Image (cartoon, grey):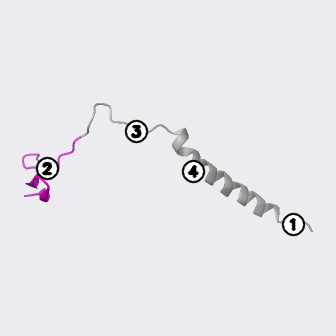
Amino acid sequence: MENKFPKSLIVVLWFIAAGLFLNAALPFLGTPAVAQSGVTKVAICDEYGSVCAEIWGNYGTDLGLKTY
């Protein structure tokens, strides 16, 4: 027995299949973002840049971000 599906449904299913395939293949097609000069550091400061947040703690215990 042969099933007949509407042509519009077949087209939609093909688009879904192509989208899933491209989504799965994207890590192999794209290039990863890499820092140009090692580690990128970010500082959280006030609007003037005069007071910045600091890492606070005792080498592994009670770590946090100290803000003003």
Identity, as a three-letter code, of the amino acid under mark 2: Cys
* Residue 45 part of the magenta-drawn span: yes
What kind of element bears circle 2? loop
Observer-side mark, 2 or 3, equals 3
Identity, as a three-letter code, of the amino acid under mark 4: Asn
Q: Quadrant for residue 16, please give it.
A: bottom right
Give the number of the disc on residue 45: 2
Say few, some or many: other residues with alpha carbon within 10 Å of mark 3 (under 14 / 14 to 19 / 20 or more): few
Q: Earlier in the sequence, mark 3 or mark 4?
A: 4
Q: Quadrant for residue 64, please give it.
A: bottom left
Q: Nearer the viewer, residue 12 or 55?
A: 55
In the rendered view, tell whether residue 17 sits above or below residue 38.
below
Q: Is residue 41 left or right of residue 26?
A: left
Q: CA distance from mark 2 to mark 3?
A: 26 Å
Q: Earlier in the sequence, mark 2 or mark 4?
A: 4
Give the number of the disc on residue 47: none
Residue 4 location, x and y as percent? 87, 66
Identity, as a three-letter code, of the amino acid under mark 1: Lys
What kind of element bears circle 1? loop
Q: Please, what is the dominant secondary structure of the magenta stretch?
A: loop
